[in-house]
Amino acid sequence: MSIDDVDMGEVHTDDVDMEGATAPTVAARSGPGALFRRRRGASARKTVTFGDASEVSGSPPWSVTSLVTLMAVWYLIKMGEEPIVNDRTFPSQRQTLDAFIEFWSDGYRRVSLWDHTYASLNRVLKGLIYGVIVGVPVGFAMGLSNRLRGFFDPIVELLRPVPPLALLPLFIVWFGIGESAKVNLLFFAAVWIMVIAARAGVLGVKGSKVHAAYSLGANKWQILRYVILPNALPDIFTGIRVALGVCWGTLVAAELTGTTTGLGATIFAASKFFRMDIVVVAIIIIGVIGVTMDLIMRLLEARLIPWRGKG
Amino acid sequence: MKDLSVDKVGMIYELPKGGSVHALHDVSFDLEAGRLLTLLGPSGCGKTTLLNILAGFLAPTSGSVSLGGDPIDGPGQERGMVFQQGALFEWQSVAQNVAFGPRMNRRKKSETKVLVEELLGTVGLQGFGDKAIYELSGGMQQRVALARCLANDPEVMLMDEPLGALDALTREKMQGLVLKLWQETGKSIVLVTHSVEEALYLGDKLFVMAPRPGRIERVYELPFAEVGLHVDPRELKASPEFIEKREELLSLIWEMEEQIMGHEGAVL
Ligand SMILES: Nc1ncnc2c1ncn2[C@@H]1O[C@H](COP(=O)(O)OP(=O)(O)O)[C@@H](O)[C@H]1O
Ligand SMILES: [Mg+2]
């Protein structure tokens, strides 16, 4: 085989040029004064943008505005001698800050802030990881085999809508009031999400990709490993992100009994003593950890599956 | 080099809600090794079905197919596939895509590397090995698909509208590449298209297929592919011989389309 001829050389240079033509639009962004100007670069020339998904990517200035508004409303409802909302209902910003400092330096109920956070993080991550370990293979099985699909379908569909809190009494009887009941509850919250995400990932594979792989000499195992698994990764990743959120949402239920450590347990205990300031601090910590973890997941996603949405 | 043999192949799809579609009826032909066969016909005449049977993804309801005397009863790497688009593995680089076949066969990595470089050169993509699939234009992606198919050194290359999603200009250039690969490698190619011009230009043998039931309506032996690389393609496509054939085929296909419309009109 001879290596290329002039004609072919020309062809791909053309192709490259066409690709390159889209690049400059990205560069013409922001700059001072552009803070509140949403339409920029090439999109500024579009005459209609409503309903154009490529035009909606969020707006940092408005996100800042939203946070500022939230803080302002919080400030306003706690303003003056007789605030609109009393201290038993919701703490002021000052009280919350004080509670945070107290929590930070002395801990709550003789457990430090770090130990509370660590205990919760540990449970959430364990529940999530077990959920992934069990959910992904089950989801794959359901996407690959009629029999296994038939077998798992009723189990998944029946148990998926059950709120984890409803299972707490059973889990306590089965697993005691120790760590395992809590982790299992979080596992329960995560596993169905992972099953469905993995199943969607498998079912989303294009027939032509699988066929191409067979024609290239791949066996079933290789199809699974080199085609179906990578093809399902974006869906699995989305599943993990959703499951992570749901696990944090289930945390208070999981830590309802049998422990004095954990942010969920803290919220529950503090609310019994009307320590709304502590409750709010714990809520904010959970929120911040949740956002941070989602950010980490998004960074991981950009690194691990850069092809997402580009098939 | 192996001949492809198709013997009285019929294909009836049973529909899940009852009824059936007669996709192929009594299709028979022999394709000597090294020929470039183009399949032309209106949509729904069974081109993809026939190609899938040759690839081994579908078993015909009657008749048989064989390559070099060996019956085809499943996919195999002596029959490579090139799809329209979206069949590349976007999680792999260009070079990894091309190396997929050898890798599945556990060929030596060093040998594969050399082979991939050579093939990327052949399809005009030297230096693009580390690029991601989604960084390439549609035409370049099809070049990768051709190289990936060639990497396993198949006897036959089966292509289902490989250039169908490309713009007209890129498509012309890619037709040149298909001809070049065909002449350099001497492989058999079966190429499905619904472009009359493409079928004429690329095919050194051409079947016009007709629907309801899908069948081979007419067979042409054509001179254009043989000379296609040595003359200006635009000149060739503007030559009286080419135009005559093109008009003949166009009116044939028009007639079929009319019949389909009439048929559907009657149903409605
Ligand atoms: N999996 C299938 N199930 C039922 N009918 C099918 C299936 N695949 C194709 N057909 C029908 O068979 C006929 C031929 O289809 P196809 O081979 O895709 O034609 P072409 O590729 O020429 O457009 C069409 O009428 C199509 O609707
Ligand atoms: Mg088709």
Image: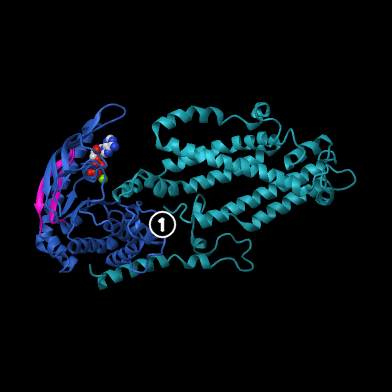
Chain colours: A cyan, B blue
Whole-percent x and y of residue A119? 71, 44
- Determine the quadrant in which ligand 2 lies: top left
Quadrant of the rendered structure where residue B167 is?
Answer: bottom left
Q: Can the viewer see residue B136?
A: yes
Residue range of the region highlighted in magenta in the rendering: B203-222
Q: Is residue B128 magenta?
A: no
Residue B56 place in picture, x, y as percent: 24, 43
Dot 1: within a 10 Å radius of its alpha carbon, few (fewer than 14), some, or many (20 or more) residues? many
Q: Is residue A303 above or below residue A229?
A: below
Q: Residue at x 25, y 39 (%)?
A: B58
Query: Mark 1 falls within which chain?
Result: B
SS under mark 1: loop
| Residue A308 appears left or right of B210 | right
Q: Nearer the viewer, residue A291 or A85?
A: A291
Magenta span contains residue B206: yes
Q: Which residue is mark 1?
A: B92
What's the magenta bit mostly, secondary-structure-wise?
strand
Which amino acid, mark 1?
Answer: Gln
Locate residue B109 relative to residue A293 in the image: left or right. left
Q: Is residue B160 visible?
A: no
What residue do we see at 53% from left, 53% from top?
A301
Left or right: A120 as drawn, with respect to A127: right
Residue B137: image quadrant is bottom left
